[in-house]
Amino acid sequence: MSGPESAAHLTSLQGWLASDDALRGRVQQRRRPPAPGHMGSLVELLTVVVGTGGIAGLITPLCTWLAGRRSDVTVTIELPDGRKVSVDVKRAGDPAAVIREANGLLNSPDGQDG
């Protein structure tokens, strides 16, 4: 996430995902060091370990959270090897389509959908 409210959105998203039975205990914050002259650090990203439900176990609650946002928020899901897929408020209304796209992209060996 990026933008002026990204830290608040990440905190909200973490709470939402952590309350999901399938993701409980699998969501962690990663913080960046504080900027010079500042006392605290900001949440930079969330790390989520998906279980047996795979990416669908993350996308479904993510889409539900995004659908409740009033502002235009985009969340990027990135694997350790750099493959990624983005989900935004507009696409959150069809979680099944997002799951199909994410599965296609994230499960293909070259990172290309199809």
Image (cartoon, helix red, strand yellow):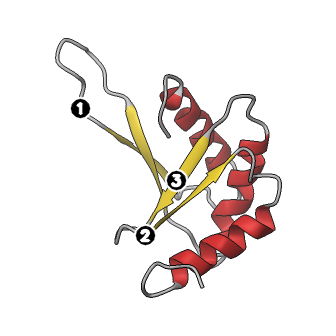
Residue position for label 1: 33
Task: Specify the label residue 83 is tagged with.
Answer: 2
Contact flag, marks 3 and 1 (Cβ < 8 Å): no
Name the residue carrying label 3.
76
Horizontal and vertical percent position of residue 84? 47, 64
Counting from the top left corner in percent of width and height, residue 30 is at 37, 44
The correct choice, above or below, for 52 with respect to 99 in the image is below
Looking at the rendering, which quadrant does residue 67 occupy?
top right
Residue placed most toward the observer, 73 or 17:
73
Q: CA distance from mark 3 to mark 1?
A: 21 Å
Q: Please say if 101 is above or below 63.
A: below
> Looking at the image, how many numbered discs can be counted on the residues?
3
Specify which label sits upstream in the sequence, 3 or 2.
Answer: 3
Q: CA distance from mark 3 to mark 2?
A: 10 Å
Label 3 vs 1, first from the N-terminus: 1
Left or right, 38 with reference to 110: left
Marks 3, 1: nearer the viewer = 3
* Picture quadrant of residue 58: bottom right
Mark 3–mark 2 CB contact (< 8 Å): no
Hey, what amino acid is under mark 1? Pro
